[in-house]
Image (tube, rainbow, N blue to C red):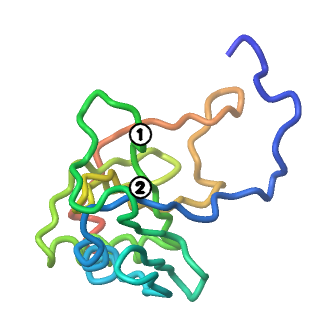
Amino acid sequence: MAEDMTPNPIAPGTRIGHVHLKVADLERALAFYCGVLGFELMQTYGRDAAFVSAGGYHHHIGLNTWESRGGRPPAPGTTGLYHVAILYPTRADLADALRRLIKAGIPLTGASDHGVSEALYLDDPDGNGVELYWDRPQSEWPRGPNGELAMGTRRLDVEALLGEK
């Protein structure tokens, strides 16, 4: 980019704490996020909202039907969330997630090796895009001749990932 858009960068330790998704059917969403992906249900707000997490955090994903009970996914060509990305700590953990998806019969919409990470793409039951990925160690990230990051998109070897223990 020609112009620096961030003259005062955000604090380096800043991170995304959670995502909150509008869903049409709370029980269906919980069956996916808890039953398939393995998140833990932390709390419900009646029949309207639920909060799920990994590792006992108060919540990584909020699910609610406050404005969306029985609703349809946004139509193609509209703005909104492209996908939520869930970072797994290891390649073996990502392989476990893939095996869970296969067992549940949930199809992938894509699978990519970005050099810095390996990623699986799918849609949740409400049509929200979901990326499941793991990051390679920074020392293995591809770099250009001047040391700049050189991410890309190549086909992920899903069979090799399934072989990960």
Mark 1 or mark 2, which is nearer to you? Answer: 1
Sequence-first tag of 1 and 2 = 1
Q: Which image quarter is the N terminus in?
A: top right
Measuring from the top left, give residue 141's x and y in whole percent. Answer: 58, 48
Residue for point 49% across, 86% down: 43
> Which residue in the structure is indicated by mark 1?
80
Label pair 1/2, CB-CB below 8 angstroms: no
Q: Amino acid at mark 1?
A: Gly
Q: Position of residue 159 (x, y in %)?
A: 21, 64
Looking at the image, residue 160 sits to the left or right of residue 56; the answer is: left
Q: Secondary structure at mark 2?
A: strand
Q: Is residue 11 visible?
A: yes
Q: Is residue 35 above or below residue 68?
A: below
Give how far apart the Cα atoms at labels 1 and 2 are: 24 Å
- Viewer can see residue 164: no
Residue type, mark 2 in image: Glu
Numbered circle sitting on residue 26: none
Asked if residue 80 lies left or right of residue 162, the reply is right
Say if 150 sits above or below 24 in the image: above
Q: Residues within 10 Å of mark 1 (few under 14, many from 20)?
A: few
Out of 46 and 119, give the one closest to the viewer.
Answer: 46
Quadrant housing the C terminus = bottom left
Residue 118: assigned label: 2
Residue that sits furthest to the left in the current view: 105
